[in-house]
Each structure stands twice: as C-alpha cells, then as structure tokens.
Image (cartoon, rainbow, N blue to C red):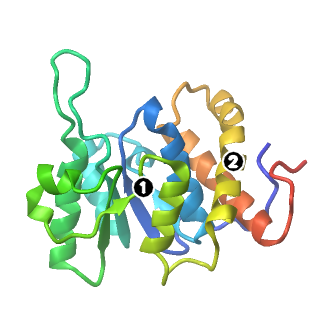
Amino acid sequence: MIPPIENVPGDGEGHSVFLNIPYDAQFQPLYLAYVAGLTALGLVPRMSVEIVGGKRRLSRVIEMIRTCRFSIHDLSRVEVDRNEPPTPRFNMPFELGLAVGWADLFPDRHTWFVSETQHRRSQKSLSDLDGTDFQIHGGTVDGVMRELCNCFVSVGRSTDVPAMMRCHTALSQLVPELTEKAGSQSLYEARVFHDLRFAATAFARNFRLGHSSAVLP
C-alpha cells in the first residue's frame, strides 16, 4: 500500500522534468526507474499522459515541454517495430526536436538530455546531434539511475544510486495494487502515473528519514 506520508509535494514544487519515452510494456522497468530516480532526486517527472481532455497529443506535448524546466528524451527504442507495416518509431526524436527548438529560443527556461542504450548509435541515426553528450544507460535500471545522477548532480537533493534503487524496488512492488485500483492494464495512463509519482515521493521521503520498510501500514 502507498505509505501515508503527509504534505507530499505537488506538481508546483521543485523542478519539473518532461519524460519522452516509449509507452510499451517492454520499457516498463526503465519507466519506473525514471519516475523513482527523478523523484528521489527531488524532481517532478511529467508526462503527456497526465493532460486529459480534448487536446490532441501534439498540443499536449508542446504544452508540457514549455512548462517543464528539463526534459529527458530516451532514444533507446527508435527501431523498426515488428507489427505490419514495419515502421521506425519517430515520436521520440520528433519530441526531442521540439525541445531542442524551445531550448534554443529560451536557454534559461529549458535544458534537455538524451538517453540511449548504446554508444554512437544515435550519432549515426541522428547526426545533427554530433557533439552532444548522450546519457548511456545500457538498458538497465541501475544505468538509468547512474545517468540521472550525472544529469542532475547540481540540481537534485543529495542522494545516491542505492537509495534510488530502493525506491524503484518499492515502486515496482506497488504496481499490481495501483493498476488494480485504477482498473487499468497499462501504467501509461493519467491515474496510474499520478499514483506512481505520489507513491515514489512517499517512498523517497521515507528512505531519507531512515525508514527501512518499503511498504508501510
């Protein structure tokens, strides 16, 4: 169950980080790593799924990028999918382009980072970014945590990868409960994302306060 922590920060507190990631089951462990890791660093993860209503997806993405101080664009899954017709996935690099353009216009309002699993792959597929330092996480949860620490070394609260991993473990154990309560089969929905972020904040605070139990009564 979600730890009963009072005064959990809302969206308006801290630095917000727009997550540009693939929405599929295979990416779920890394998705949870981003949510847990950013929260443990005192940052607020944001995703376009949380904006509900009649706006089309592109409008939601643009609005979210403009309102977030940072963005992370994970290009580790920009491959040709197996479903017919075989098609590469362009959403992540397209949204990265939106963030690059916004940051170029307002460099004091937005900073972007690019994540990958392999060295030099994105330099080959996206040569316009030659000279950019990519965050290479190797497709692992601890790799994501390491790279988040590198990105936000001067921004987030003082924490370390083991503490972030504990938060990830606790959050992963909570997934069945959260999806059941939301009546959802997917983690990439507004209610589930909201609950994941709330729970991650509570877990992170518990660990900072020295509580050893991941799940509290």
| Disc 1 residue crowd, few under 14, some 14–19, many 20+, Cα 10 Å | many
Q: Is residue 46 above or below residue 157?
A: above
Image coordinates of residue 124 in percent, x first then y, are 13, 52
Which mark lies nearer to you, 2 or 1? 1
Left or right: residue 147 versus residue 180 is left
Residues marked 2 and 1 touching at CB (< 8 Å): no
Left or right: residue 163 versus residue 26 is right
Q: Secondary structure at mark 2?
A: helix
Res 137 label? 1
Left or right: residue 13 versus residue 64 is right
Image coordinates of residue 109 in percent, x first then y, are 30, 79
Left or right: residue 119 versus residue 138 is left
Name the residue at 16% across, 58% down.
97
Amino acid type assigned to the residue bearing label 1 in the image: His
Image coordinates of residue 186 in percent, x first then y, are 51, 30
Name the residue at 20% across, 53% down.
122
C-alpha distance separating marks 2 and 1:
18 Å
- The residue closer to the viewer here, 178 or 114, is 114
| Disc 2 residue crowd, few under 14, some 14–19, many 20+, Cα 10 Å | some
Q: Is residue 113 visible?
A: yes
Q: How many marks?
A: 2
Which residue is most to the top?
84
Q: Quadrant of the N terminus?
A: top right
Q: Secondary structure at mark 1?
A: loop
Looking at the image, is mark 2 or mark 1 earlier in the sequence? 1
Q: Is residue 68 visible?
A: no
Q: Quadrant of residue 5?
A: bottom right
Amino acid type assigned to the residue bearing label 2 in the image: Thr
Name the residue at 28% across, 56% down.
119
| Residue under pointer 2 | 169
